[in-house]
Amino acid sequence: MSAGPQPVELPCKRFVVLAMIRLILFKRFAAFLAVVSSTTSSLAGDPPRPPVIAPVALPAPRHGHRTERLDGGLLTFGGFGDPSAPDRESKETWWLAPGTKEWKRRADMSVGRAFFGSAVDDGKVYAIGDGVEQYDLKLDRWLKIIPADRLPRTHFAAAAVGSTIYVLGGFGGREKLLAVDVRQTSVNELPSPPGFKKGDHFHCMQVIRGRLHVVGGVGGDAQTLKTEHWSLDDPRAASASKVWRSETPSPTGVWAKFAVQAVQDDKLYLFGDFGAFRFDATKKEWTRRTSLPFEIVMPQAVVSDGSIWVIGGNPVDEKRKRRRILLRYDLARDQWTDYSE
């Protein structure tokens, strides 16, 4: 008599191994698609995300200086430090390497600078004012590329589009709107914003979506803060109109002397003794933000990982003087945190 069909024992271990192999292959394929997507996005023209930087306070109090992102780290140079120093340390350069927590001294500029401008192009930093000096991080060397008589010395506004740095107003030298090509080492005059007069200075000037934006400033004659807001196409572009466009005025007069300035996601942020505002270039509107914890003269700011970091500056409050300023503004939460020492 037949015993009938016998139950078949499933090879469980084999199925488990096959499932694990499929899972591994799936994860690798997903990672491959992510890389392809990222590469395609980059090729399409999307700007790459800047590396995350965790700033630390400068070794000593400083204001009127410049701070630029360079090679994954931060470079700070110029400005005023110890009042008892012969040149107030206005030639000094400091470097915060990526992933480190300590600023290191680098080569000094050839001349002292304070309340000046700067920019980065093709891995080089440029100090603007009293001429132009170029800094090479690998060689640790400053090289003067444009003489002093072709640019203003101090209190001007500066912003860069690629290798062209635009300089407006200020004192000493040519007090107009100038286009400085750091690769060709040329300086050309452009039409100034409507209403601009000799002696106007401390404008807030930034680049948003390839356009120069000039906001506020101090009138040279009446010493009053302005609310005017103008924008200009990149003059290098073939389609540029080369005509200043009137933009929504700032809610109150603003100026760069007490201002923290930063641009993120097509939005301009201004914080200072005048208040705190954000300009949305898409909506063409200003909105109020949370003010600084305390007023600061001539600070510097960098944007990193969803935050605006304020590095240095001189507090107006006498009780806070000679502090190593370090503030963090959370863009999403509209909130300040004070890490000053």
Image (tube, rainbow, N blue to C red):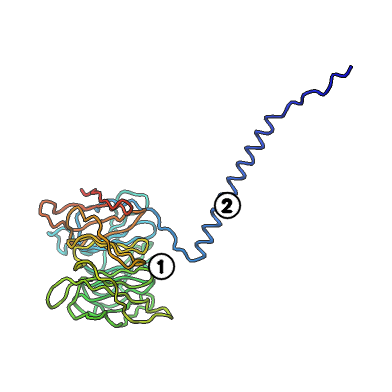
Q: Earlier in the sequence, mark 2 or mark 1?
A: 2
Q: Residues within 10 Å of mark 2 (few under 14, many from 20)?
A: few
Q: Label 2 to label 1, Cα distance in Å?
A: 30 Å
- Residue under numbered circle 1: 122
Q: Looking at the picture, does residue 188 appear above or below residue 102?
A: below
Question: Which image quadrant for residue 262?
Answer: bottom left
Vertical placement of 176 versus 337: above or below? below
Q: Could you say which is closer to the camera, residue 328 or residue 276?
A: 276
Amino acid at the residue labelled 2: Phe
Which labelled disc corresponds to residue 32? 2
| Residue, far right | 1
Residue kind at label 1, given as amino acid type:
Asp
Judge by depth and name the residue closer to the eye, 102 or 195: 195
Q: Position of residue 130 (x, y in %)?
A: 23, 74
- Label 1: how many residues lie within 10 Å, few (<14), some (14-19) or many (20+)? few
Q: Is residue 19 left or right of residue 176?
A: right
